[in-house]
Amino acid sequence: MRTCLATLFILTFGFIHGLAIADTLELADGSLVEGRYVTSNDDYFIFEIGGDIEAFPVDEVAALYLSE
C-alpha cells in the first residue's frame, strides 16, 4: 500500500510539474499564449498549444519566454 501511494504521488507531482512548465509568447496586444515553442522563421513563431500547432506572425509577437 505504501509503495502504491508513493508511486501515485510521484506520478501526480510529475504530471502537475509538466503542466506548470510552458513556453510563453507575449503578443503585441499584451496577451500571453502558453504552449511549447516548436520553431520560428522570418515570418512566423510556431507553437504547440494543447496538441494543436499554431503559427503567430512575427510582427504580432512582442516577446518569447522559454521555460527551462
Image: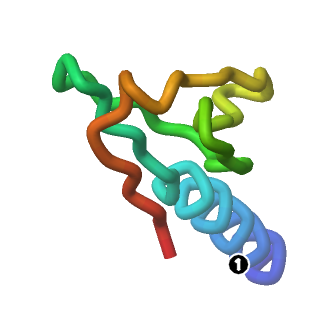
- Report the residue at 27% width, 38% height from top: 62
Residue 23 percent coordinates (x, y): 49, 52
Look at mark 1 in the image and give the residue it sits on.
6
- Report the residue at 37% width, 32% height from top: 61
Residue 14 found in image quarter = bottom right
51 or 13, which lies in front? Answer: 51
Judged left or right of residue 58, residue 10 is right
- Report the residue at 47% width, 66% height from top: 67
Residue furthest to the front in view is: 42
Q: Quadrant of the N terminus?
A: bottom right
Residue 68 percent coordinates (x, y): 50, 76
- Report the residue at 67% width, 36% height from top: 46
Q: Is residue 17 above or below residue 31?
A: below
Residue 45 found in image quarter = top right
Q: Is residue 36 above or below residue 66?
A: above
In the structure shown, which secondary structural element does the residue marked by tag 1 occupy?
helix
Residue 29 percent coordinates (x, y): 20, 17
Amino acid carrying mark 1 in the image? Ala
